[in-house]
Amino acid sequence: MTTTAIESKTNVDCTKVQGRRALSFANLEEALADAEALVAAKYVRMLGNHSLGQLLAHLGIAINSSMDGFSGHAPWFIRMMAKTIKGRILKKGMRPGFKLRTRRETGAFPAQISPAEGLEKFRAAIARCGKEKMTAPHPAFGKLTHDQWYRLHCHHAALHLSFCVPE
């Protein structure tokens, strides 16, 4: 059973967090293996604003949304800026600190979910993307190929799971 140091929002400035793990996943199976190890760990120190269950469910929601579509898109100025950084993010990954609008965050991070439940959502989404193509437009980047989506999800998982430190 996993216990976490932070179970609710504490408004941590994620750009300034020290002690994050350096992660890079070549594929989603590596991300899933890391998530499984975190859930199996006796204790996981959470360095950000979300619980382990919330982060894992969020990763599953993001993968499913890349197949099912998103309910909206980013503001025009974010979409314009995203075009200039899309290649770098697909190649090198994301930096911490991006904040979703409150209503978007509510849908992207379930309020109460156990690590085991979050893991199942993540596992099911990974299995699904192995059978279906991810072709929905990204809210900021627009059209992405399945392979671009896959790479983005690997980076996304590495970013979020870097805030989870097993002890």
Image (cartoon, rainbow, N blue to C red):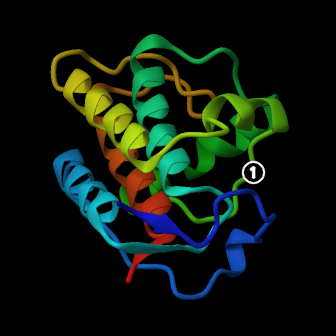
Q: Residue at x 83, y 38 (%)?
A: 102
Q: Is residue 160 above or below residue 148?
A: below
Tell me where residue 1 sits by quadrant: bottom left
Q: Whole-percent x and y of residue 93?
A: 44, 59
Does residue 124 sit above or below 58 in this rendering? above
Residue 129's place in the image compared with 99, above or below, is above
| x, y percent for residue 144 | 41, 28
Name the residue carrying label 1: 99
Residue at the (51%, 20%) spot, across then down = 137
Amino acid at pointer 1: Lys
Q: Is residue 24 above or below residue 166?
A: above
Regarding residue 5, the answer to whether it shows in the image is yes
Would residue 93 be visible to someone looking at this image?
no
Quick one: 45 or 85, which is closer to the camera? Answer: 45
Residue located farthest toward the bottom when viewing the structure as drawn: 19
Identify which residue, 159 or 76, lies in the foreground. 159
- Please tell me which residue is depicted at 64% across the width and 43% down the height of the picture: 82
Q: Position of residue 126 (x, y in %)?
A: 26, 33
Q: Nearer the viewer, residue 142 or 15?
A: 15
Instruction: Give the position of the C terminus as an image quadrant.
Output: bottom left
Element assignment for label 1: loop
Residue 49 in percent (x, y) is at 68, 61
Horizontal side, residue 5 vs residue 74: left or right? left
Q: Residues within 10 Å of mark 1 (few under 14, many from 20)?
A: few
- Identity of the residue drawn at 49% across and 48% down: 53
Classify residue 74 by image quadrant.
Answer: top right
The total of numbered circles placed on residues is 1
Tell whether 90 sits left or right of 11: left
